[in-house]
Image (tube, rainbow, N blue to C red):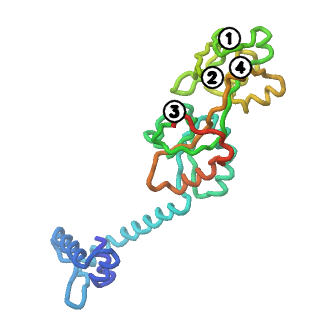
Amino acid sequence: MASLLLVAEERSFTRAAKRLGVSPSAVSHAIRGLEEKLGVRLLSRTTRSVAPTGAGEHLLARVRPAFVDIREAVEEVSRFGDKPAGRVRLLVPRLAATTVLAPKLGRFARDYPDVTLDVTTDDSRMDIVAAGFDAGIQFGEYIEKDMIAVRVSPDHRPAIVGSPGYFQAHPRPKSPRELLGHRCINFRHGSAGVYRWEFERGKKSLSIGVNGPLIVDALELVTRAALDGVGLAFMNEDHAAPYCARGELVRVLEAWCQPFPGFFLYYPSRRQQPAALSALIRTLRLDSASTGGARKGG
């Protein structure tokens, strides 16, 4: 059909072949095959000219608008390769949504007004490809090795905290194993289950499955429960800092809480990365001078 359109426009097999990047005989063969399939002659050929027959004119009148639409659609999509536009579906845990994504949403919207950022906040570690997401944000240790990962946050450092009232009734733990004798606030990471508290000191590392009166899946509830003396809590050092500075929470086991790589934006390897995703990466990427560590496990 494309060959027929171009021959009709150019009134020449040679010029049509040049526009298609093929030989004149290839164009002639394609049209002959179409005529045989339809059982009707579409072009009148002489040694000097080529012109559509009545049947050819009728067919061209019907298919030409469709080809115009196709050409415009292809040109429109090709512009996406240079100009960030379209939709980017992103899977983000709630902590990353508030600490990594939220502070840069305004800038991203201003810089790339033709991009729609479709964000799902979910703490479960689902397969982004199977779920139809373009990219995700997660701690480096949870990202599969076949993904491309770009750091989007500094290193994180955990903090074990409790209220002054809690420590009036309970001794301060001196080692992670002593947490088994304490009331602790557990956090559930979606379908991944309850998080085991992880510790490192020198070459020693261990994880503790703590027990306590509360299991939640929201950081706000962890914080509120710790402030109210429900038990000890495991949280990000930066989140705990203002409460500790005001004396509302007290930190313990600090020597066992070592920094670990923070959040990374990750996505499957593609030969041609969509411009909209590239724009998001540029916006969220952390300056390498601020990293201070490598990604764990991926």
- In the rendered image, which quarter is residue 255 located in? top right
Does label 1 or label 4 sit earlier along the sequence?
1
Q: CA distance from mark 3 to mark 2?
A: 22 Å
Cβ atoms under marks 2 and 1 closer than 8 Å = no
Check disc 1: other Cα within 10 Å, few if <14, some if 14-19, many if 20+. Answer: some
Cβ atoms under marks 4 and 2 closer than 8 Å = yes
Name the residue that disc number 3 marks.
125
Does label 3 or label 2 sit earlier along the sequence?
3
Q: CA distance from mark 3 to mark 4?
A: 28 Å
Q: CA distance from mark 2 to mark 1?
A: 16 Å
Does dot 2 land on a helix, a strand or a loop?
A: strand
Q: Residue at x 30, y 80 (%)?
A: 8
- Residue farthest to the bottom? 48
Name the residue that disc number 1 marks.
182
Name the residue that disc number 2 marks.
199
Q: Residue at x 44, y 64 (%)?
A: 73
Q: CA distance from mark 1 to mark 4?
A: 13 Å
| Residue 225 appears in the rendering | no
Q: Nearer the viewer, mark 3 or mark 2?
A: 2
Q: Nearer the viewer, mark 3 or mark 1?
A: 1
Residue 157 in percent (x, y) is at 68, 31
Name the residue that disc number 4 marks.
253
Residue type at tag 2: Phe
